Amino acid sequence: MNNMPESSLVDSFSPPNEFSQKKSFIEEILRIPFTENNYIRILENGEEIFQTILNSVSSARKIIFIEFYLFKDDDTGNTLAELLKEKSREGVTVYLLYDHFGSLLTSKDFWSELKKAGIKYHVSHPFKLFSPRRYIYRNHKKLLIVDGEKAFTGGFNIADEYHGFIKKKQKTWRDIGIYLEGPIVHSLSELFMKSWRRWKGIPIEFDSKTEYSMTGIQAIPIFASTGRARRRMRRLLIQSIKNSKNNIYITTAYFLPSRKLFEALEHAAKRGVLITLLLPGKSDIKSVYYASRAYYSKLLSAGVRIYNYQGTVLHAKTAVFDGIWSIVGSTNLDFQSLSRNDESNVGILDKSFSSKMIEVFNNDLQQSTKIIGDTWANRPFHQKILEKVFSFILKQI
């Protein structure tokens, strides 16, 4: 935890032609254009995320869209639910999607009370007796939209561990979100309404287009709910690594890269790109935690810098490429996220925003330990065995 980030972690030089090149390959892969003139703010921790959400929901006048993997009936979930009920009684229409597996332990009474208050909800990826294999797919999105004007996304779910309402003196998980205004919110609203129809919701009649006079950030949705969209998301990540010339900063909760993704990182490091990975020092899923560590040795040999976050569970999912291209959202660098899940991310092409992202990244490095090659090679033998065992098992799933 006493490793200060190297000074090279804060530098970024991005000529205008590099900006244009990145924009071009991103739009080509995603097959959609960037939206312009957006306002986007980083929400640096759970307390800031949920206080901003509660404030925005309180101000809702017309409509609220919510789509989350996990919506618990704990203090955080109940606080938001009571506010949603109040807004529904005031005449605000509330649409809510939740993942069946992710919210499996949320009580039926909780959903019944929402329905009684007039809130419309559907479950995504429900278990079906005659196609149980489909249950491995998840709606891992995290999205909340108010009046088609304000939006939130990131790595967080609706639960105490992401907010700060923690009992037994446990620490809040480390997560990051973003608050958005501008034309990007219209794009996100359209994506929610498409998702709502997919899960048997009656089509929503709402014109989310709003006039904006601001000048600001270019942003693009990176959502994946189909095999084709997931392939584009994977290609975007790999090409973002391959096209990077200076530096890459990645934070992820679960790191089980595909062969192509791993090779892209390895080759980029070997050609001189400064790559820094911030990975969990502890995890809520021990099998993934140990399996991910099986990749460390080769990455360290290639020149990749690896840090383990200490003190609490790291759950954020962010990436910054060359100090101008950032991605924030729900996607982890593992097979489940990249090949099976429905995911929600926003890409931001802006040097000032990326600089702020790197600043947040550097702050997290100050609470992390750096993995040193020689020390890592001499780690306890039982850890090496666990890494090999869980790596082998997870590759079979």
Image (cartoon, rainbow, N blue to C red):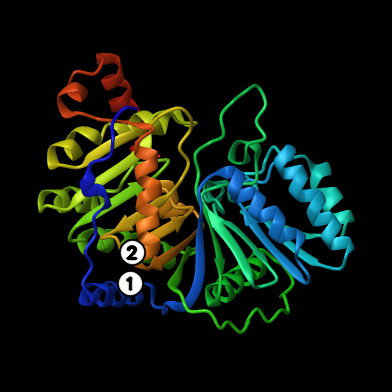
Mark 1–mark 2 contact, CB under 8 Å?
Answer: yes
Amino acid type at circle 2 is: Trp
Residue that badge 1 annotates: 26
Q: Position of residue 337 (x, y in %)?
A: 44, 50
Q: How many labels does the image show?
A: 2
Dot 1, how many residues are within 10 Å of its Cα: few (below 14), some (14-19), or many (20+)? many
Q: Which circle marks residue 136 in the picture?
A: none
Which quadrant would the N terminus be assigned to in this image? Answer: top left
Residue depicted at x 30% and y 31%: 293
Frontmost of labels 1 and 2 is 2
Residue depicted at x 83% and y 52%: 114
Residue depicted at x 65% and y 41%: 159
Distance from disc 1 to disc 2, alpha carbons, whole Å, reads 10 Å
**Residue 153 visible here:** yes
Q: 180 or 285: which is nearer to us?
A: 180
Which sits earlier in the primary sequence, circle 1 or circle 2?
Answer: 1
Residue that badge 2 annotates: 325
Extreme residue in the top direction: 381
Q: What is the secondary structure assignment of the residue under circle 2?
A: strand
Q: 318 or 354: which is nearer to us?
A: 354
Q: What is the secondary structure assignment of the residue under circle 1?
A: helix
Q: Where is residue 200 in the image (x, y as percent from the top left)?
A: 70, 66
Amino acid type at circle 1 is: Ile
